[in-house]
Image (tube, grey):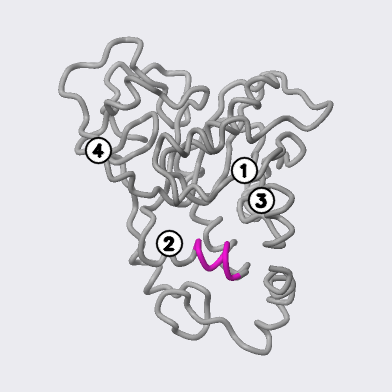
Amino acid sequence: MRFASSLSRLRPLLDLVFPPRCIHCGRLGDYLCETCREEAQSVGSDICIRCGNPLTTRGICHRCRQDPPDPIRAIRGVFFYNGPIAQSIRGLKYHGLRGLAPILADYLIAYIQAHPIPIDALVPVPLHPERLAQRGFNQSELLAARIALTLNIPLRVNLLRRIRPTLPQAQLNRKQRLQNVAGAFAPHDGVSLHGETILIIDDVATTGATLRACARPLRAMGAGDIWALTVARANMNVALDAPTSPSSPAEAFLLWDANRKQLIPDPTESLI
C-alpha cells in the first residue's frame, strides 16, 4: 500500500517519461481519449428527482416515497457507472492515475453550470485516515478542489471527518450499506454552519448511503439545503418504476435549476 501511495505522488514525473494512455482503449496521449469520452452514458433526465436513480419516466420512485434521502434535497449523478467512466474512476482510486481527476471533475463542473443553484460550499466525502494513508490522496477532494478553483466556490475540508473505517460499499447490499456507514462521519471540533447551502461531492453513488451519512452531521452543524453530486451512478439492480398516480403536494420537489425556490407541482417535469 505504501508503494501505491508513493507511485501516485511520482505519477506527474512518470507521465513526462511515459506519456499516458487511455484507461479504456489504451490509445496514447490522454488518460481518457475523446473517442472513449463519447462512449460515456449520461444518466439523463428520466430519474427519481430525490435519489437520482433512473426511472422509466421522471418522478419520485417508490423507495423515496417510503425512505427519502433526507436530509439531502437531491442526489444527482452525471453518468452511469460503466464503460470508460467506471474504468476512469477505478483508475483514479486504485491505480493512482491522478490525471483522470481533472477529466472527471470537468464533467461535474459542466453539470453544475448547466443546472445552477446557489452553492456556499463544496464538501468532499472524507476518507478515514488509514485509507488516506494507503491511497495517498482523497479522490473526492481532488474532484472538489478543481470544481472550487474553476467555479470560485469555497472548498470546505474542515467540516467533516471520518471517525471509523468502513467496509467497501460495493461488497454490501442496501441494508448493509446503511449500517456500514451509520455514524461513520462527524464534525471537526469547533466548526459550525449557519444555513449555508452545501454540495457534497463524491465519485460514485449507489444507494446514497454514504452521502446521507455525510449529510446528517452537516445538518446538525447548521447547514441549510444539502445537495449531492457524483460523477457516476451505479445500478442498484432494483425496479424503480415511477408511480402512475399524481404526486401529493408534500411530494412535490424543488428541482435542480436556477430558481430553486420555485415549487414544481408536477415532479415529472424536466430539468432546465
Quote the CA–CA distance across marks 4 and 1: 26 Å
First of labels 3, 4 by sequence position? 4
Is residue 109 among what the camera can see? no
Instruction: Bin the neighbour count of mark 1 within 10 Å (Cα to Cα): few under 14, some 14-19, many 20 and up.
Output: many
Say whether residue 92 is magenta: yes
- Residue, disc 3: 141
Q: Which residue is drawn at 39% across and 16% down?
A: 263
First reached walking from the N terminus: tag 2 or tag 3: 2
Which amino acid does the dot numbered 3 rest on? Glu
Q: In the image shown, does 57 or 182 lie closer to the viewer?
A: 182
Crowd around label 3: few <14 · some 14–19 · many ≥20 (10 Å): many
Please give the range of residues in magenta: 89-95
In the image, residue 249 lies at what x, y percent?
A: 32, 10
Q: Tell me if label 4 and label 2 are in contact, CB under 8 Å.
A: no
Q: Which picture quadrant has residue 19?
A: bottom right
First in sequence: mark 2 vs mark 1:
2
Image-quadrant location for residue 12: bottom right
What's the CA distance linking mark 3 and mark 1?
A: 7 Å
Going by the numbered disc 1, the residue's amino acid type is: Val
User: Of the residues under marks 4 and 1, which one precedes in the sequence?
Assistant: 4
Residue denoted by label 1: 125
**Circle 2 residue:** 86
Mark number, residue 55: 4
Q: Which of marks 4 and 2 is nearer the N terminus?
A: 4
Residue 122, position as x, y percentages in the image: 64, 39
